Image (tube, rainbow, N blue to C red):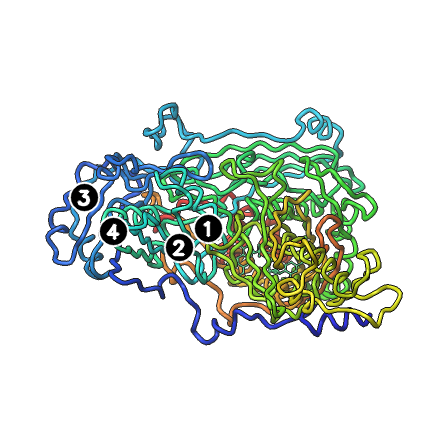
Amino acid sequence: MTQAKDEIKIGGLGASRKRVEDNRFIRGKGRYVDDIVLPGMLHMEILRSPLAHARIVSIDTSKAWAIPGVRLVLTGEMMATRNLAWMPTLSYDTQAVLATDKVRFQGQEVACVVADDPYIAKDACEAIVVEYEALPVIVNPTQAVAQGAPLIRDDKDNQHDNVIYNWEVGDKEATDRAFAQADRVSKLELHYPRSHPSPIECCGSIADFDRSTSKLTVYMTSQAPHVIRAAVALVSELPEHMIRIISPDLGGGFGNKVPIYPGYVMSILASILLERPVKWIEDKTGNLISTGFARDVYLKGELALRNDGKILGVRMHTDADHGAFFSDAQPSKFKIGLMHSAFSCYDIPAAHLTAQGVYTNKAPGGVAYRCSFRVTEAMYFQERMVQAAADDLGMDQAEFRRRNFVRDDDFPHRTPFGFLTDSGQYGKCLDVGLEAIGYADFLREKEEAKKRGRLLGIGISTMTEPLGAGNSREYDILGMKMFDSAQLRVHMTGKAILRTGAKTQGQGHETTWAQIVAHELGMPAEDILVEEGDTDNTPFGLGTYASRSTPVAGAAVAMVSRKIRAKARKIAAHLLEVSEEDIEWELGRFYIRSSPERGVSIQECAMAAYSNMPDGMEPGLENVAYYDPPNLTWPFACYIATVEVDPVTGVWDVLRVVAVDDCGVRINPMVVEGQIMGGLTEAYAMASMQFITFDAQGNCVGSNYMDYLLPTAWETPGYELHEVVTPCPHHPIGAKGIGECATVGGPAAFVNAVMDAVKDTGVRNIDMPLLPDRVYEALTKRHDVSGAPPVKTDD
Ligand code: MCN
Ligand code: CUN
């Protein structure tokens, strides 16, 4: 008890410590890539294709070269002479760095200019004359596989159609049997539209190649700097130790900063050619039309049901629109990410999933946006299907979920698609949520309101999701096994520096990692400086995405602290002149078991490690830990939203949102709550307003913040947060990931709420975003505004 009290005082586990990084962020003192100015630095701008599909007939750069201040103009043809026109993607595909033969999506990189300042570079881009020969455009999976569809990837030797993969998982026969035994089958078709992570800071890089040392330093907006260094070493001829990737402060990542973009590659090449630092900073339109899209998946789903509410089996088919290049960041074994994590919290005997991925004339999609590799789509489909099934059975939606949940004593549990979940209290989370929202009262209120023509609705979304990509047996990216690391150096005076292979983008690692060390070593969190993002002085790691930092790097932080403690114990025995076996540990102090008043602090041990170590002991107090997790972590969430829909206009307002999250032990409850609120806001945005679509010519509609909407404080609903704690059985401090839960689980709560409000009018589905005109259309014209047309023409 006193230990826990002390622990909060030193900023250990469970302390809602204020974020240390905010000291600089709220003062405008963050150091982002664009803040960095190097001597002699040049500026790069990119010329992008206005057309979605066209043959390049010619590119005339002479006028651009003639502009004073222009140092270099690069085209695909010039890149090709160095074998650099194409680069490998994280999904074993290839992607054009600069287009050579064809452009394949609007916004594709066609040429770039390096000049003395960014304005000259931009002007010079406009002076480049490109002659295009337009080709027929494909903007959705149906068009992609239609008879006679134009071949988008004619650059690839064995590619004769627009199909990237066909993939399946699960047990088809068992699933067929389940459906044969079903009392009824509930079906749903949905589209999860394209969305964009849209961090406030766009992507950018400064490449600085120094011929005299042969060292390449690249400042880069990357969530995974070590992966980038390895990838650069593998595709360029530069040796890995001569490449230094530095990710400084990032203004949000949300998955947008996982992939490798042509801009990074061109700035590196330009710096090598010119032997000067070259900066590339993407503008907002460039970011919105060409980088890291997410989702764009169609689903046909079926649930085999027994009349008593038991789900006997699930069948899913998805069509994934990947755009012109298959560049998902995802474990290489899973062609559509972890889509098969669907239904993991439900006890379903049989499941079968088929998936087809196709090329279209859209920017490469499929980067997860705050989602562990397609988990967002999986959970959205799951929770929409579950609600539809409950409605079809005429059963209460909460009761239907409860009946099918994996029970608390059923762990470890093999999920319908083969994952192993290890812990959770699903029923309890649901109960806490229902209690908080006042479920029974709301249902009564809803009935009352209906009598007066008002449409109220309640939506529930419950899910467990796999967070913490790792365990090297099953997960790798480009063959790089997924694990992570931490290095801890405790100085003589008891102050320490901790470095990890992860990279914070706003999640607060500088605050929370120090809390783990404080918990393990009893040193005040403020005595520990956390550094990430510089490959020269942090240990190798796979980076931050898939909410893997706490599950993997965070575990490494605990493990390296324990290594330090083990050494400090030996030193303590030496200082106290007893044998190690007689030593006990309490937070921050070793003492003699038989005389507890005689002890030494961890700080005294640190001093002795440099000044008074035992004979034969290696000096210093420093170590590194690589952590390969035994399993993913499986947090659980229950999100409940209530809404009122205006039947006259289709406008809907959120009344209340209750969130119950179980992410195991919380390191910093305030940071966790911040993650949940941010995630719910993104979920609300996708459900209500966010829409990047394409017209029939492949023009991107949503290339700016007038068309692609971010909710402001005014639109954002209030959130009521609750917690349940089921410690992760295999994580050293019992923590599970939380970074994405609310974005993953949130959308279905909002959509389910609107659907619940309108279902008595016969509406079956409305695809996101639930813009008022769509809701109105559903109420007045058709009952199924689904498979939403990605082709939106002005007429
Ligand atoms: N945490 C905690 N207790 C837990 C779990 C987490 O205190 N039981 C804390 C962690 O220590 C960390 C934060 O919560 O400070 C998030 O931890 P975690 O769930 O491990 O997620 P990551 O740090 O790996 O962050 C990645 C995740 C992803 S994948 C996206 S996308 C996303 C997100 O985080 N992008 C973000 N949240 C974001 N938040 C901000 N501000 N900016 C982004 O770009
Ligand atoms: Cu998936 S977006 Mo986050 O994993 O960087």
User: Which residue is labeled 4 in the image?
Assistant: 275
| Quarter occupied by residue 489 | bottom right
User: Which residue is labeled 1 in the image?
Assistant: 225
Horizontal placement of 71 versus 262: left or right? left
The mark lying in front, picked from 3 and 1, is: 1
Alpha-carbon distance for marks 2 and 3?
A: 30 Å
Image location (x, y in percent) of residue 790: 43, 45
Q: Is disc 3 in contact with disc 4, using a CB cutoff of under 8 Å? A: no
Q: Which mark is residue 220?
A: 2
Residue that lies at the very extreme toward the bottom in this rendered image: 27
Q: Is residue 181 above or below residue 466?
A: above
Image location (x, y in percent) of residue 326: 43, 37
Q: Is disc 3 in contact with disc 1, using a CB cutoff of under 8 Å? A: no
Q: Is residue 716 above or below residue 279?
A: below
Give neighbour class at mark 4: few <14, some 14-19, many 20+ (Cα, 10 Å): some
Which of 302 and 279 lies nearest the eye of the viewer?
A: 279
The mark lying in front, picked from 1 and 4, is: 4
The mark lying in front, picked from 2 and 3, is: 2
Q: Is disc 1 in contact with disc 2, using a CB cutoff of under 8 Å? A: yes
At horizontal 39% and vertical 26% (from top left) the residue drawn is 159
> Regarding ligand 1, which quadrant of the image does it lie in?
bottom right
